[in-house]
Amino acid sequence: MCSPARSYINHQVRCKLEREWPSFVSRYLTALARQAQRRWENSASHRELTINRTLAVIEAPWETELSPVEDTREFIFFRDFFNAFRECTSSCKALDLIGELSAASIDSVDVNKQSAAITFWAESYLNEVYIFRLRLHNLIKFIQRRYKKDADFTEFVIEVGDSLAKFVNEQLGPLINDRGTHVHVRRHRYADPELARLAGLDVLIDALGQEELRDNRKGAKEEAKEWLTQQVTHFSDLAWHLLNEVCRGFADGILLENDYIIVPIHYKDAPCALVENRSQ
């Protein structure tokens, strides 16, 4: 795992102060944190190794190279599961942060840069939604690949995972296509009506001297900011919802009612078993 149990607990508390995490997302975090906590409390060598490796990075971040270490197959399974899960929650939190920063920053920049600021934040949330979809698909694939070799889970994880991936694509597909057009064909300001209006007003006023349109631009900026807030809020909420639905969808097969994740048979530890500490 990336950090000891205390870090996981503090992480969960901080996030709940910002937004109450959906129920199944919280349950998975609890289940994964238990594994780190158990290792942290029961293994002095693990605590020492974690602290020393972390201090090495803190003291010499550019010079430190952390070589792989041996660990049990089961612990590596939980570590990799947590890392895939955390990538998704990080994107959800980034969308929340974009909402906060965009609302706070647009009015703080020079008035002549506000149209550009609105466009910047609109394109930023598009990119983060794109990243989120990739990470959510990676989580689905991770669960499918880790469990499908266990006959007790094969049919379940393939059927449920494929259905969840389709659902995610249906929910995010239109926005992902819009983002692809923005990246590969044109800037997003030409695809979004609110941004297109701002771009047109900027040209008429700043390039062609149509000063009588300044009040129009002021109103257009306010409407574009409102539209941006609505969009970012919607897709931030949607991202958390989709992550929760993925967690919920797999929960019937791999998450016990007492919030313990079932380990597939081929990742369960044999006595004293150690394997090279790499993603599998």
Image: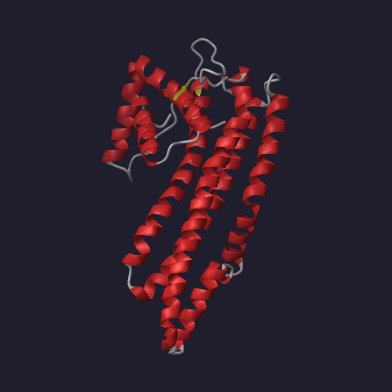
Q: Quadrant of the C terminus?
A: top right
Q: Is residue 32 visible?
A: yes
Residue 139 spot, x, y in % from top left: 57, 37
Residue extending farthest to the bottom is 209
Camera-side residue: 145 or 179? 179
Camera-side residue: 270 or 210? 210
- Name which residue lies at 37% across and 34% down: 11
Residue 129 spot, x, y in % from top left: 54, 51
Residue 276 spot, x, y in % from top left: 50, 25
Question: Going by the image, does 232 lie left or right of 262?
Answer: left
Q: Quadrant of residue 261?
A: top right
- Name which residue lies at 49% across and 27% down: 27
- Name which residue lies at 53% across and 69% down: 194
Q: Work out whether 113 lies above or below 262.
A: below
Q: Quadrant of the N terminus?
A: top left
- Give the colouring mode of the picture: secondary structure
Question: Going by the image, does 132 lie left or right of 112?
Answer: right
Q: Work out whether 135 lies above or below 173.
A: above
